[in-house]
C-alpha cells in the first residue's frame, strides 16, 4: 500500500490512455467538443483529483475536451494535482455566476467554430447558456460515447480498482470485528469509515454501510439506531473511493459469529451465485444475470444485480427494472462489475453478497482477496 | 415541518404557473419529500437517485426511491406515494417513468425539472416540449431560503454533532499525526453522535506562510480548500479546517484555524484580533432587511479597504439543505447583485472572512448564525482555541 502525502494527478499512462480513447470516439462520432459535468467523467478525461462532496451534483461545465487540439480545459482555481499537459491558461476558477462560466468557455480555442458539442447531462439553465459559448454548435448526447469507453477498463484501471477493493476489504474486516449484540447500523458505519480513513482513504463510495435484514419482509429496514440482536443477519456494503475509483464489496454475517447462517438459505445463495458466475461468459447478454434469479426461483433483489465499478457510475447497470437495457449489453473482456446475489427467507432474514469481478478472456475473476463464498464457508 | 414545506413549494409553483415539479437533485428531493438517506459518492448518486414528483394540487409529493429505509419514509408519506426506483439516465427508465407519471398528473401539464439527463431530453411524449424545460430548481431555491423554527432546531443539532467531532479531532491534533488520521476521528465521531452522512472530505489544510509558496491560482490569491492526504502535520503548522455533515436533511458547516502543538505567537494573535474586528463590524450591521452589499461594505471598511475574503468564494453564504446556497454575500455574481440581495428573517448565514498577512499566513474561521428581525442569533458556540 502506497502512502500518499501530496495531491498528484492520476498516473500518466492511466490518464493518457483514457483520454486517447475518448478522443478516438469523438473522432468516430464527429464530436468537436465534449463538455462534462459528472465528476467521474471529468476525472476520466482530465486525470485531476478534485474536492470530494457527497451526493449528486447538477450539471455544470466541469471539464472540456477539444478534439482538434486534444486540449483539456478544467474547472479548477488552482494547479495542485493538475497534470502537466493542462497548462494554467486552460484552468478556469470556481464561480457562482453562470455568465462567468460562459466567458470561460468562450475563450476556449475552437469554441466559436464547434459544430457538434456533446454533454453528459444538462440543466434547464445550462441548456440556455451553452449555446452562448458554442454559437455554431448543435448540443448532442455525449453519454453513449462516455459509456462505451468507460465500461471496458484498461489494465491500469483494473489495478486501480483492485487497490480500492483492497482498502474496502481491510476496512470491512475491522467493522466485522465490531459486530456484536447491541451495536447499531450507524455505529458500525462509523467504525468502517474510521478504518477506511486510517488506511489513508477519506472518501467513501457509500455511507450506508450496515443493514440489519428483516425477518418479516424481503427488503424493508428499520431505523439505523436499532441495536443488533443475536441471530440477526446483518448485511455490510463496503465501498471506498481511492484515486477516484470505486472499490466495493458486500457481505452478510450472522450475529454471534459461531452461529451458522441458516443452511437452506446458505445453499440457495450458493446456487444463485453459481448461476450468476456462469452467466458472466463472454458475449452473453446481461439478461442472463436476471435469468439466474428466475432459474433458482429467487425473487429479484432490492438492488441492481450488477453495477459497473470504475470512476463512480459505470456500465453495466443490470436490474430487473430495466430488462431491455440489460438485453442490449453483453459481457465483454475488461468489464469490471459488482455482482450481487441476494436471497431472503421469512423468519430468518437475508443473505447478501456482492463481489467485485473483472471479466477476462478466461472468465470472471474476483478482485477481492477473500471472496464471500470462501469467507463465509470459513466462518460457517 | 414537511407540511409547511409542501405548502411553500406548491404556493411557489402556483405563482410560476407550474403543474408538476420533477426533481432529481439529491438535496432538492430531500427538501420536497422529507426523505433522508446517507448520501453516496456523486458517481454512485447518479444511478441510485431518488426522484420526487410534486403535483400542484396534491398535498403529498411522490417519491421514487431505491432507498430501503421504508419505515421512516412511511411515517412521512402515504404508501401510494412511495414508488420503486426509476433510472432516468436510461431511455427505458425514462419511458417507464413517463408512463407512471401520466397517471399522476393533469392533462397537458406544465412540468418543470431541476436536472435534465440526456435520456429525459429524448422523451417528448409527455414530459417536455422540444425546447429546454422550465427550471424547477428555482422553486426549491426560493422555498428553502428561509428556515422554519423546526428546521433551525434540526440544523442546530447537526452543527452540535459536527462540533462534537471537531472537538475530538482537536484533542488528537499533535505533531506527527496524519491529516487522514484527523479525518478518521472525525468520521467515527459524527456517526457515533448521530450524523446521517459526511458531506465534504474534511479539510485540514496546512497554510503556507506566503501565497507564492502555495499552488498557482487563477486569481493570484490563496488556494483553498486543498485536498487531505496522509501528510503528517508538524509543530507550528497553521491549519485551516473546513468540514460539514448531513443530519435530518440539513448540512452543517464548520471552519476554524488551529495551530499544531503550539500556542499562537503575538503576530498570530494579532491576526485573530483583526479577524474579530472584521467579524464584529459585519455582525454589527447584520439583521433582516439589510442588503448583502451592506455586509460587504462593513467588512471592507473594517479590513482597511480590502476585501477580507477569498475572491473565488465569498464573505458569506447560506446554509441549509445544501452546504452553500443562497444568500451568497460578496461572490462573483457581482456587487450589483449584492445590492439587491436583502437578508430575511429565518435565513441561515455562514460568515467566513479571512485575515491574510503574506509572509505570516493568516486566520480564517466561520460563524454560523440565523437572521432575525432585530439582528442575528448564533447557532454555535464552538471556542476559538488556541486563540
Image: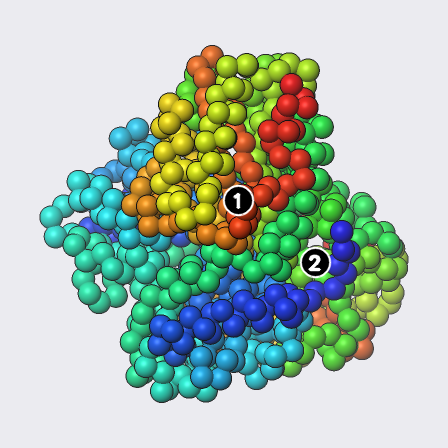
Q: Quadrant of residue A17?
A: bottom right
Q: Residue at x 73, y 46 (%)?
A: A199
Number of disc labels: 2
Q: How is the image coloured?
A: rainbow
Q: In terms of depth relative to the viewer, which is nearer, B273 or A350?
A: A350
Is B149 positioned to the left or the right of B299 in the image? left
Can residue B183 be seen at all in this image of the molecule? no
Question: Residue beneath label 2, please?
Answer: B228
Task: Pick out the residue farthest to the front.
Answer: A362
Within 10 Å of disc 1 (Cα), the crowding (few <14, some 14-19, many 20+) is some
Question: Do the CB atoms of the residues marked 1 and 2 lie less than 8 Å apart?
Answer: no
Quadrant in the picture for residue A35: bottom left
Report the quarter where the N terminus of chain B lies. Answer: top left
Q: Residue drawn at (67%, 61%), measured in percent from left and top?
A: B227
Foreground tag (1 vs 2):
1
**Label number found at residue B209:** none
Front residue (pair B101, A86): A86
Q: Which residue is mark 1?
A: A363
Q: In the picture provided, is A375 more to the left or to the right than B330?
A: right
Dot 2 crowding, Cα within 10 Å, few <14, some 14–19, many 20+: many
* Subunit ID for the residue under disc 2: B
Q: In the image shown, does A34 or B278 lie closer to the viewer?
A: A34
Q: CA distance from mark 1 to mark 2?
A: 38 Å
Coordinates of residue B62 in the picture (x, y in percent): 29, 39
Amino acid at each position: 500500500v502506497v502512502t500518499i502525502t501530496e495531491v498528484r494527478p492520476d498516473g500518466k499512462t492511466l490518464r493518457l490512455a483514457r483520454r486517447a480513447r475518448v478522443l478516438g470516439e469523438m473522432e468516430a462520432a464527429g464530436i468537436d467538443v465534449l463538455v462534462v459535468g459528472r465528476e467521474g467523467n471529468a476525472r476520466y478525461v482530465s486525470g485531476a483529483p478534485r474536492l470530494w462532496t457527497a451526493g449528486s451534483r447538477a450539471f455544470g461545465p466541469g471539464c472540456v475536451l477539444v478534439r482538434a487540439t486534444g486540449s483539456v480545459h478544467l474547472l479548477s482555481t488552482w494547479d495542485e494535482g493538475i497534470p502537466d499537459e493542462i497548462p494554467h491558461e486552460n484552468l478556469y476558477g470556481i464561480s457562482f455566476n453562470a455568465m462567468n462560466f460562459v466567458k470561460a468557455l468562450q475563450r476556449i480555442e475552437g469554441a466559436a467554430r464547434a459544430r457538434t458539442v456533446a454533454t453528459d447531462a444538462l440543466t434547464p439553465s445550462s441548456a440556455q447558456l451553452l449555446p452562448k459559448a458554442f454559437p455554431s454548435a448543435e448540443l448532442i448526447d455525449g453519454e453513449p460515447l462516455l459509456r462505451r469507453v468507460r465500461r471496458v477498463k484498461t489494465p491500469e484501471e483494473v489495478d486501480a480498482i483492485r487497490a480500492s477493493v483492497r482498502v474496502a476489504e481491510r476496512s470491512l474486516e475491522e467493522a466485522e470485528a465490531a459486530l456484536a449484540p447491541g451495536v447499531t447500523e450507524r455505529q458500525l458505519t462509523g467504525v468502517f469509515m474510521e478504518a477506511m480513513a486510517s488506511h489513508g482513504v477519506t472518501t467513501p463510495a457509500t455511507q450506508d454501510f450496515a443493514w440489519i435484514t428483516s425477518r418479516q419482509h424481503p427488503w424493508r429496514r428499520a431505523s439505523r439506531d436499532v441495536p443488533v440482536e443475536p441471530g440477526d443477519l446483518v448485511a455490510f456494503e463496503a465501498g471506498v473511493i481511492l484515486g477516484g475509483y470505486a472499490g466495493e464489496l458486500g457481505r452478510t454475517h450472522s450475529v454471534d459469529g459461531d452461529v451458522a447462517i441458516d443452511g437452506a438459505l446458505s445453499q440457495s445463495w450458493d446456487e444463485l451465485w453459481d448461476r450468476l458466475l456462469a452467466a458472466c461468459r463472454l458475449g452473453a447478454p446481461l439478461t442472463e444475470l436476471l435469468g439466474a434469479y428466475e432459474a433458482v426461483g429467487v425473487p429479484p433483489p432490492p438492488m441492481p444485480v450488477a453495477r459497473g465499478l470504475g470512476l463512480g457510475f459505470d456500465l453495466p447497470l443490470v436490474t430487473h427494472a430495466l430488462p431491455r437495457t440489460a438485453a442490449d449489453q453483453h459481457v465483454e473482456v475488461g468489464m469490471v462489475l459488482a455482482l450481487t446475489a441476494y436471497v431472503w427467507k421469512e423468519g430468518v432474514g437475508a443473505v447478501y453478497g456482492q463481489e467485485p469481478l473483472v471479466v477476462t478472456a478466461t472468465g470472471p475473476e474476483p478482485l477481492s482477496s477473500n471472496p464471500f463464498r470462501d469467507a463465509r464457508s470459513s466462518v460457517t | 415541518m414537511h407540511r409547511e414545506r409542501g405548502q411553500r413549494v406548491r404556493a411557489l409553483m402556483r405563482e410560476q404557473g407550474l403543474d408538476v415539479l420533477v426533481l432529481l437533485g439529491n438535496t432538492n428531493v430531500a427538501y420536497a419529500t422529507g426523505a433522508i438517506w446517507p448520501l453516496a459518492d456523486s458517481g454512485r448518486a447518479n444511478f441510485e437517485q431518488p426522484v420526487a414528483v410534486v403535483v400542484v394540487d396534491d398535498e403529498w409529493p411522490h417519491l421514487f426511491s431505491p432507498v430501503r429505509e421504508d419505515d421512516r419514509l412511511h411515517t412521512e408519506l402515504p404508501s401510494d406515494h412511495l414508488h420503486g426506483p426509476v433510472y432516468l439516465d436510461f431511455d427505458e427508465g425514462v419511458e417507464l417513468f413517463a408512463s407512471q407519471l401520466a397517471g399522476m398528473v393533469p392533462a397537458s401539464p406544465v412540468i418543470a425539472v431541476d436536472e435534465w439527463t440526456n435520456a429525459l431530453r429524448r422523451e417528448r411524449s409527455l414530459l417536455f416540449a422540444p425546447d429546454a424545460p422550465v427550471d424547477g430548481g428555482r422553486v426549491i431555491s426560493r422555498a428553502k431560503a428561509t428556515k422554519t423554527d423546526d428546521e433551525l432546531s434540526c440544523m442546530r443539532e447537526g452543527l452540535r454533532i459536527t462540533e462534537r467531532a471537531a472537538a475530538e479531532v482537536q484533542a488528537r491534533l499533535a505533531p506527527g499525526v496524519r491529516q487522514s488520521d484527523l479525518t478518521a476521528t472525525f468520521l467515527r465521531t459524527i456517526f457515533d453522535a448521530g450524523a446521517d452522512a459526511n458531506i465534504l472530505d474534511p479539510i485540514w489544510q496546512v497554510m503556507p506562510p506566503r501565497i507564492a509558496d502555495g499552488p498557482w491560482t487563477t486569481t493570484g490569491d490563496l488556494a483553498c480548500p486543498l485536498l487531505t492526504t496522509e501528510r503528517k502535520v508538524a509543530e507550528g503548522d497553521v491549519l485551516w479546517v473546513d468540514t460539514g455533515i448531513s443530519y435530518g436533511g440539513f448540512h452543517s458547516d464548520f471552519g476554524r484555524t488551529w495551530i499544531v502543538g503550539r500556542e499562537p505567537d503575538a503576530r498570530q494573535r494579532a491576526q485573530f484580533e483583526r479577524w474579530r474586528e472584521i467579524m464584529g463590524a459585519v455582525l454589527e450591521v447584520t439583521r433582516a432587511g439589510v442588503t448583502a452589499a451592506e455586509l460587504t461594505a462593513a467588512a471592507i471598511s473594517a479590513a482597511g479597504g480590502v476585501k477580507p475574503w477569498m475572491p473565488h468564494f465569498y464573505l458569506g453564504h447560506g446554509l441549509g439543505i445544501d452546504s452553500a446556497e443562497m444568500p451568497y454575500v460578496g461572490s462573483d455574481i457581482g456587487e450589483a447583485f449584492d445590492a439587491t440581495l436583502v437578508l430575511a428573517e429565518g435565513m441561515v448565514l455562514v460568515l467566513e472572512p479571512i485575515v491574510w498577512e503574506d509572509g505570516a499566513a493568516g486566520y480564517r474561521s466561520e460563524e454560523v448564525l440565523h437572521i432575525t428581525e432585530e439582528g442575528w442569533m448564533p447557532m454555535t458556540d464552538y471556542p476559538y482555541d488556541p486563540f
